[in-house]
Image (cartoon, rainbow, N blue to C red):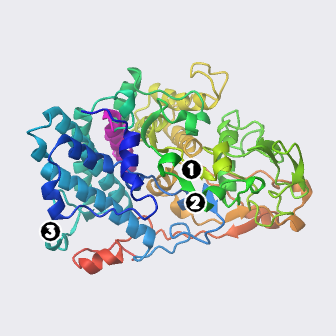
Amino acid sequence: MKTTTIYILIISVLLACSCNKLDLTPPDQPSTTSFYKNQTELEMAVDDLYRIDFWSNDDETYTDNHWYRGELGNAVTFGTMSTQDVNVQNYYQTCYNAIARVNSFLANKDKAAGNTPAAVITQFESEMRLIRAYQYARLITHFGDVPFVTKTQTITEASNNIRKSKDSILQFIFDELDFAASNLPSSYPVPAVKRLTKGAALAVKARTALYFGKWGVARDAARGVMDLANTGVYNLYPSYAGLFQKSGENNPELIISIPRDQTQNVYSSGTIVQDFLPRNRGGFGARIPTREMVDAYECTDGKAIDESSLYDFHNPFKNRDPRLTASIVEFGTFWLGVGYQPHPDSLTVYSLVTNRLVKNNDCRTNAPFASYTGFLWKKGIEQSWVDKLAEDNDRIICRYAEMLLTYAEARIELNDIDASVPDAINQVRARAYGVNVSQVTLYPAVTATDQAALRQVVRRERRVEFPLEGLRYMDLIRWRLAEKALTRPVIGLPDPARQDRSKWPFPGVTPIDDDGIADYSGFGSDVKIVAQRNFDKKRQYLWPIPDIERRVNPKLSQNDGY
């Protein structure tokens, strides 16, 4: 097999459509009859499914971690999801477009058998079956029972599909991932480093099993990835902040990541970038962390803020888990060359760019639309975003830290707790503190062995380890916490004229319940409700089958409440 870099393979497909919406429709029958006739065409078909369109975790705005000022309400967190929701429709159709392409490949791959080594065809087949399994995993986690298609279909056949039990599809997913894990290599030569591997198949299996409470399957699949780590395939990257930067794009913690590159027109630009940037650096401060996200980080003694004597609500960044300041801009520090201080009386800040004081546009006294919570994201953002008003960081889908916490959670839920459980959590936690897991006096090492206590620990750990990575939404869904977390208001700072300076930045210690959910109801007018979430627990744990699909195929049933 050629070792052409996956960057080039993906980009070559994207270049032709970088200025327009990607056409995700599977090839029609005439084209498939003349394609797949050699190794090059097989490889092109596989590589086309590595596009970012087919790979994503959930939007962070669906959670209590993140809020977007420019969006009055998304359908998930504001309870407006319907059968005609465009995002739901696109999600559903994109998954099935990928599945259709895989089915076409599998039906036609043997056309190249006469000129392509059998081992190469098997590897391509394994990648495709992994991709199809991943798409079905995305579908059943969001929609429940869905149409199940494993062969190419005519329009007539497709219009007669019915929904199949998610449990039977789940078993199919596991079987497909087992095939992929058995036939894919653990790693590739450097030029092809971004291709799907044995570890990727195991990771998708572990995540999917976790989401459906198949604890034994999740434990074993995650353990398989950990075994690969023991042979040197994976490792936690020493710098938590660094692994999300351009410099960390090929680090050994990444299991699945999708390349992006501005020079090849695979990147984000304009408003979506500016929404994350401070106003002092040409941004809007509109996509921001919630107060709940900030309050979720423990203190350096390993206790929640409402339990720790180290917590100072007047200085909320002090004595906190280092992932807080790695992920969220600390008040009174320089960020992207300019001091960041949202205090209502900080009308000027110092700019390292101009070497002088400048008007502080990240203070709402000067700029009413500056961050409503006072917080800005730092995770994954770097100077190039400002310089180019563009970002092309690779998209991380899955990394080794997730497997460690998956392994720990699965064994906790099985109540099969031994030393390997706190050790897995401690590996992730120690890395956050920049120390070795054995240096237990230098970070708040987990020592608990009680199931309830460890469940609380691992859930908190997932939240502060993975913000902005799209994992929080499914955690809220599977833990059945969405009905609590997503019915509470988004809390911001009072308007400057109403801000009691003696209570800056917050009037007291936030109560945090056993589920890690913050309660701001006791702070009255010392906080401001900037948005009211709404989540209907009777229907929203599943998404609706899109109306357009049911118009084409009336045999498709609908989820309750839609």
Query: Could you tell whether 489 is left or right of 46 in the image?
Result: right
Q: Is residue 98 above or below residue 1?
A: below
Magenta residues: mostly which secondary structure?
helix
**Res 468 label:** 1
Can you give x and y, in whole percent of width and height, for residue 263 in the image? 51, 46
Going by the numbered disc 1, the residue's amino acid type is Leu
Q: Nearer the viewer, residue 171 or 370?
A: 370
Q: Which mark is first along the chain, 2 or 3? A: 3
Magenta residues, as a range? 196-220
Residue position for label 3: 154
Q: Does 280 appear in magenta? A: no
Residue with the mark numbered 2: 485
Residue displayed at 67% across by 23% down: 442
Amino acid type of the residue tagged 2 in the rendering: Ala
Q: In the image, what residue occupies the spot 81% across and 67% down?
A: 525
Callouts 1 and 3 close, C-beta under 8 Å: no
Residue 207, magenta (yes or no): yes
Q: Is residue 174 visible?
A: no
Task: Name the foreground residue: 120 vs 297.
Answer: 120
Q: Secondary structure at mark 2?
A: helix
In the rendered structure, are the residues bearing label 1 and label 2 in contact, judged by CB atoms less than 8 Å apart? no
- How far from the left and from the top, in percent, is residue 259? 45, 43
Q: Amino acid at mark 3?
A: Thr
Give the secondary structure at mark 3: loop
The answer for how far apart the CA atoms under marks 1 and 2 are is: 17 Å
As drawn, 20 above or below 124: below
Mark 1 Cα shell of 10 Å, populated few (<14), some (14-19), many (≥20): many
